[in-house]
Image (spheres, helix red, strand yellow):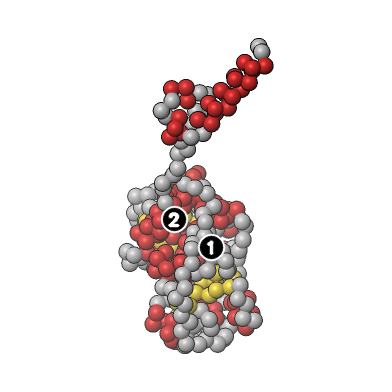
Amino acid sequence: MSYRRMMIALVACVLSLGLVAVPAYAANKPFATTKCAYRPVAVSTFDSRAAMVEAANAYFKNSPSPVISSPDLYAVVQAKDVGYEIVDIRSAEAYALGHIDGAINIPFRTIADDASLARLDATKKIVAVGYTGESGSMTNILWNMLGYKTTSLMYGMSGWVADPAIVGSALPSSVGAGYATVTKATVSTRTYRAPRLSAEYTNVAEAVKGQARAYFAKHIATEISVSRVHEIVESNNRSYQIVSVRQTAAYATGHIKGATNIVWTDIADQMTRLDPRKTTIVYCYTGNTAAQASMFLNLMGYETYNMTAGMSGWNRDPAVGGTGGYDAATVPNYPTVK
């Protein structure tokens, strides 16, 4: 091939590639359909964040009963009520120490795994039972977002039997720390963009499970102690934000200095009031409803911790805390099986 012919061939090739790069022009040219033809990239239109908010609100906005008392659950067990499924979410080792008759075992950090979910009966009311109540409440919101009818046992196994050798952990303290509260409300009108999710999803179930697995993969603590929160407040550490998820009237009686108020059932609608660059601490009365708010926020990408025992662990005054908190002397000590 002569030099002139080589140059003509080279120019023709470059021009054909250029036309391919401009689809609007190439569409009118028959020689534009080459091996380099433009292929449009599919773009997902599924809004994972909005779908997860909707799933959470299907629970939050329907007058949820966040816990079941040990006497009420004992009545279910005694009646052998087939409308309930009891799931012990403690470790396999703790489950072996003693558990509620009929309870199956699904350890907490596996609650979003497909194999674990396959063991749940969607036709029944599911009761999640943890150590002291908080992990059960976190399980509660996650499974509700997946469409299961779930509640959790108040105070977990420590509310069923006051024996740490069976509970598998120390019992909650029955005496609050006695830290001060304030009545002046902390108000913030600023809003923020919610964090980016860890992946893209095609449906809400995959989003909830995927975000939960991403959270569990971090292996971070689910709770923060009242003493640590007190240190944060006293040092005026601005890398944290504190949220009371108690009812507005309870917040007004006394709350932690600097804490804003977002009622736990409004957390999905008002999460953009939270700065995603800060670590979030949530607290409630005894730790149960805040645990649900904490789990939801962690699913949405916020780094969030539930303050252990809530206001009952912070303050000794039931009038401020809204409850007297855990009392081992009142635990009924119902029977367990191995």
Residue name at image x 57 percent, y 85 percent: 179
In three-dimensional space, the C-alpha distance between marks 2 and 1, rounded to whole angstroms, equals 13 Å
Crowd band around label 2 with a 10 angstrom C-alpha radius: few (<14), some (14–19), many (20+): many
Q: SS class of the residue under badge 2?
A: helix
> Which percent across, then down, holds residue 35?
53, 24
Residue 174's place in the image compared with 107, above or below, is below
Query: Pointer 2 and pointer 1: residues touching (CB < 8 Å)?
Result: no
Return the residue at label 2.
49
Residue name at image x 43 percent, y 34 percent: 24
> Which percent across, then down, holds residue 302?
53, 63
- Relative horizontal placement of residue 41, taking residue 57 as reference (left or right): right
- The residue nearer to you, when weighing 16 against 193, is 16
Confirm whether residue 7 shows in the render: yes
| Count of all numbered marks drawn on residues in the image | 2
Residue name at image x 47 percent, y 38 percent: 41
Q: Quadrant of residue 55?
A: bottom left
> Which percent across, then down, holds residue 167?
56, 64
Residue name at image x 53 percent, y 81 percent: 258
Residue 48's place in the image compared with 228, above or below, is above
Task: Say which amino acid is labelled 2.
Answer: Arg
Return the residue at label 1.
302
Task: Say which amino acid is labelled 1.
Answer: Tyr
- Relative horizontal placement of residue 3, taking residue 210 as reference (left or right): right
- The residue nearer to you, when weighing 337 against 63, is 63
Residue extending furthest toward the top: 1
Residue extending furthest toward the right: 3
N-terminal-most mark, 2 or 1: 2
Quarter of the image with the C terminus is bottom right
Residue 51's place in the image compared with 12, above or below, is below
> Which percent across, then down, holds residue 226?
59, 77
Q: SS class of the residue under badge 1?
A: loop
